[in-house]
Image (cartoon, rainbow, N blue to C red):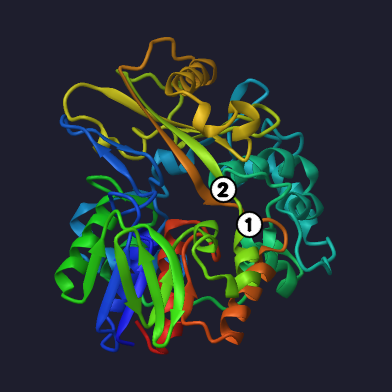
Amino acid sequence: MQTIAVLGGGIGGLATSYYLCRNPQVTKVIVLESSSRFGGWLWSTRRSDGAVFEHGPRGIRPAGAVGRNTLNMVEELGLEGEVLPVTYSHIASKNRYLYVNGQLHKMPSRISELLRTVPPFSRPLLLSVASELLVTKSKEDDESIHSFVSRRLGKELADIAVDSLCRGVFAGDCRKLSVRSCFPPFYNAEQRRGSLILGMLLGSGPTPVISPGSLAQRSIKESWAQWSLRRGVESLPESLAEYLQQSGKVQLHREAAVKQIHPSASGWKVHLEDGVVSADHIISALPAKALSSVLPSSCQPLIQQLQDVSSVTVAVINLEYEGSILPVMGFGHLVPSSEDRGLLGVVYDSVPFPQHNRPDGQTTRLTVMMGGAWFQEVFGPPEAVTDEHLIARATEAVQCHLGVTTAPIWSRVALQRDCIPQYYLGHFSKVESMRHFIRENNLPLSLTGSSYDGVSVNDVIFSGRTAVQELLGTGV
């Protein structure tokens, strides 16, 4: 492999380039990013008074192979001194709320709370869990998350808890999202063990083996639930870009939108606004739809399948209030679609990460998430909605849900268009057939990023690693 072009300079493209440039088989990596900055949805505002606000992902989970993999990368980049861990014993981990029937309800977090009826549920959750062992296995290839949970744990849990969870994680509708693609451990647990509970206890199948470095070992020992970085999560892509810059192997290009790619004798010609880049292989970390619009017409079946992967727009509204204004302490609250279709949830940022508050004078930072799968229905077309309207709707929710009567002293709107891909029913077979088409036609092309194998920061970084391993056939 002489030259590899990586399309997209978000966390997926940067992580892919990181694994490429650490491999001796690769001589040159060219990263093409259409916008003026690297990092994609990992985007932090650092105010001059020391406050930090996130406009995308905030806490990153350390759990599992993919979590360990990210922490290993953080350590290799020399960022371990910047890590802000939140342990399982922290109030932000123990207290998570749902806003149902006009009030906040703490989600059960202790065994004793599972044994008794805790509102908004009408029966002890342990009953749902115990009866799950008796439910027969589905023979279907795929199923919506709502249908899967209703069948195994009851409709009430699906309508309230799982509906809210899917809005919090995917900004999506659990009645349309695929359980097989969004929660593979759930699907595999049923397939292999006949039960979610047995799957959790006995394991639901092989997982990748990633040996933990000293930071990942520390996360296990100290029992971290999530972590961030002192200057915000954008420090991760910034450090990656710096590492790549210094490697001597990588050319980083901003404002280099790919217009078209064409096959050539040695691989591809990548056409930009102001020139052409030649590459032996392309790894695309672009959203599926963006890739579909630049492929040659000879890739028609692949183009069609890429266009079928849709995504949703989320309005992220950061608010800062003077003083300590929260009626409860915890990570935040989620809102089921039956309660308010437009409002997904509110994160109480100052609780898990007080280090991101400005150092002088007490303030409370909140993030209100709105829209997602319901954006168009509630707010109309994204290009027509105003910041003022979104801020008014967010502050009204804070007043109504948390009883906060004062106005925020600072606010910021980030309208994240098409930021989270939606894995609808049959997503796994769509992705399989995309990769089958690429193999059958011997295309020097790899697919990575959030459109295919998981939307979390950890999943996206790991999919970059996997793409490089599959391409070069060696460990990373």
Cβ atoms under marks 1 and 2 closer than 8 Å: yes
As measured in the structure, the alpha-carbon distance from the residue carrying label 1 to the one carrying label 2 is 9 Å
Q: Where is residue 303 in the image (x, y as percent from the top left)?
A: 60, 66
310, above or below 449, in the image: above
Residue closer to the observer: 444 or 464 = 444
Pair 1/2: label in front = 1
Q: Which residue is drawn at 33% across and 50% down?
A: 35
Q: In this view, does 74 lie to the left or right of 416?
A: left
| Residue carrying label 1 | 423
Amino acid, disc 1 = Tyr
70, above or below 171, in the image: below
| Residue carrying label 2 | 170
Name which quarter of the figure residue 428 lies in.
bottom right
Q: Position of residue 224 (x, y in %)?
A: 38, 55
Image quadrant occupied by the C terminus: bottom left
| Disc nearer the start of the sequence (1/2) | 2
Q: Label 1 neighbourhood size at 10 Å, few (<14), some (14-19), many (20+)?
A: many
